[in-house]
């Protein structure tokens, strides 16, 4: 799962709409590290409500170029495993991630929204093994869709104040690229 830090409190949409472009970009880049995606969303402000922002984010994610996807993937990190996970599970997941990165040249991403924590590890291992059989072009499409879903989940969490449903191992791998939270 990939999990990123979200603000402890919800970001008011009104503040995001009125924020300087640089501050708004910081908020968005925490959700998906694509400058093209963030700039497109900033250019279409103000948003009347969260569903409008999420719809715009979805649309902008569909339009990401291969270079934009590469930029976003470079900021993703490997997922952390839930506390108390057996060493064998760590070994299996690390091996699967290494095989995936070797084959495709980037980290494995998956959006585990609505997945119970006790099913996350099995889901991730099954998905990564299955996706290793994809050809690179097919996997690029799957990865783009997972990034789109992650961005939407992260945006929703940031603006609604909800903590991510992602569990350590699938929503945003361990946060290796900490990004500063948006200013209050």
Image (cartoon, helix red, strand yellow):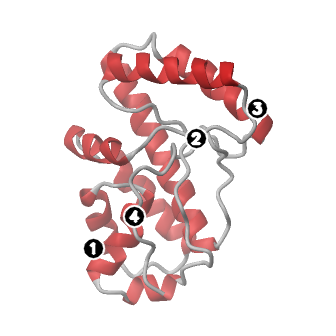
The residue at the point 54 percent across, 80 percent down is 11
In front: label 1 or label 4: 4
| Residue sitting nearer the eye, 160 or 48 | 160
Mark 4 in CB contact with mark 3 (< 8 angstroms): no
Residue 116 placed where, x, y %? 78, 41
Residue with the mark numbered 1:
43
Residue with the mark numbered 3:
119
For marks 1 and 3 on the same chain, the one whose residue lies earlier in the sequence: 1
Mark 1 vs mark 2, CA separation in Å: 34 Å
Disc 3 crowd, CA 10 A, few/some/many (<14, 14-19, 20+): few
Outermost residue to the front: 87
In front: label 1 or label 3: 3
The residue at the point 54 percent across, 14 percent down is 130
Residue 64 placed where, x, y %? 28, 46
Residue with the mark numbered 2:
80
For marks 2 and 3 on the same chain, the one whose residue lies earlier in the sequence: 2
For marks 1 and 4 on the same chain, the one whose residue lies earlier in the sequence: 1
Image position of 178 with respect to 100: above or below? below
Image position of 147 with respect to 37: above or below? above
Mark 1 in CB contact with mark 2 (< 8 angstroms): no
Mark 1 vs mark 3, CA separation in Å: 39 Å
Name the secondary structure under disc 2: loop
Residue with the mark numbered 4:
179
Question: Total of numbered circles in the picture?
Answer: 4
Mark 1 in CB contact with mark 4 (< 8 angstroms): no
Name the secondary structure under disc 4: loop
Outermost residue to the top: 133
Outermost residue to the left: 67
Quarter of image, res 39: bottom left
């Amino acid at each position: 799962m990939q999990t990123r830090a979200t603000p402890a409190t919800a970001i008011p949409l009104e503040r995001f709409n009125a924020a300087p472009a640089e501050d708004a970009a910081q908020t968005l880049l925490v959700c998906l590290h694509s400058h093209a995606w963030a700039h497109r969303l900033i250019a279409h402000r103000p948003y009347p409500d969260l569903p409008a922002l999420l719809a715009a984010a979805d649309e902008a994610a569909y339009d990401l170029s291969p270079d934009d996807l590469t930029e976003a993937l470079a900021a993703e990190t490997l997922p952390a495993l839930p506390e108390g996970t057996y060493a064998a599970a760590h070994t299996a997941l690390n091996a699967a991630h290494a095989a995936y990165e070797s084959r495709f040249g980037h980290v494995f991403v998956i959006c585990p929204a609505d997945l119970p924590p006790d099913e996350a590890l099995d889901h991730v291992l099954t998905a990564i093994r299955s996706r290793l059989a994809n050809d690179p072009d097919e996997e690029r499409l799957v990865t783009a869709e997972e990034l789109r879903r992650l961005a939407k989940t992260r945006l929703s969490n940031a603006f609604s104040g909800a903590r991510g449903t992602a569990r350590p191992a699938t929503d945003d791998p361990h946060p290796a690229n900490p990004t500063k939270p948006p200013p209050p």
